[in-house]
Image (cartoon, helix red, strand yellow):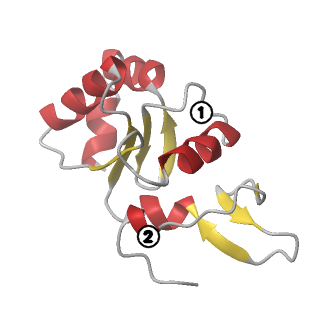
Amino acid sequence: MPKMESITSLNIDTSMSLDCHMGIRDTQHTYAYTFTRVVAEKPVVIFSKSSCCMSHAVKTLIYSFGVNPKVYELDEDPNGLKLETELNALGCKPSVPTVFIGQDLIGGANEIMSLHLQGKLAKLMRS
């Protein structure tokens, strides 16, 4: 598997299908690339769009916990459209914002805000 330096080196073949472990698998069942690898870069990873107000709100909230997440701005990335397609295939609708904490898909703005209002988001950030 090629070593990933940054999201700009990401080459996803959108004809591949996602398996239940958030990985992309071709018909020979070999992994071409996985979201797991992307979300392993930092404890908190956010897929966002710079023009999305909900993305901005989620990023601001997460920064308020003193967390320095890895943020992928899909509208500024050359592979953003492909990533957005894959996020939609994971069930992320809308595709942004999408938050991973500890390599687990937490969800979008609704899930993040609900966890925050329940007092559970701070606990997730600390774990």
Residue 46 percent location from the top left of the image: 37, 43
Residue at image position (47%, 28%) is 108
Image: 46 above or below 60: below
Q: Is residue 47 left or right of residue 18?
A: left
**Residue hosting label 1:** 92
Marks 1 and 2, how far apart in space? 23 Å
Q: Quadrant of the N terminus?
A: bottom right
Given this view, does label 1 or label 2 mark the residue nearer the observer? 2
The residue closer to the viewer here, 64 or 72, is 72
Residue 121 percent location from the top left of the image: 32, 31
Image: 113 above or below 23: above
The residue closer to the viewer here, 5 or 99, is 5
Q: Residues within 10 Å of mark 2 (few under 14, many from 20)?
A: few
Residue 33 percent location from the top left of the image: 61, 69
Residue 81 percent location from the top left of the image: 54, 44
Residue at image position (48%, 47%) is 80
Query: Could you say which quadrant of the image residue 24 lies in?
Result: bottom right
Image: 39 above or below 68: below
Residue at image position (42%, 31%) is 97
Q: Is residue 104 left or right of residue 7?
A: right
Q: In the image as oriented, which residue stretches furthest toward the right?
A: 27
The residue closer to the viewer here, 85 or 102, is 85
**Residue hosting label 2:** 9
Q: In the image as oriented, which residue stretches furthest toward the front?
A: 78
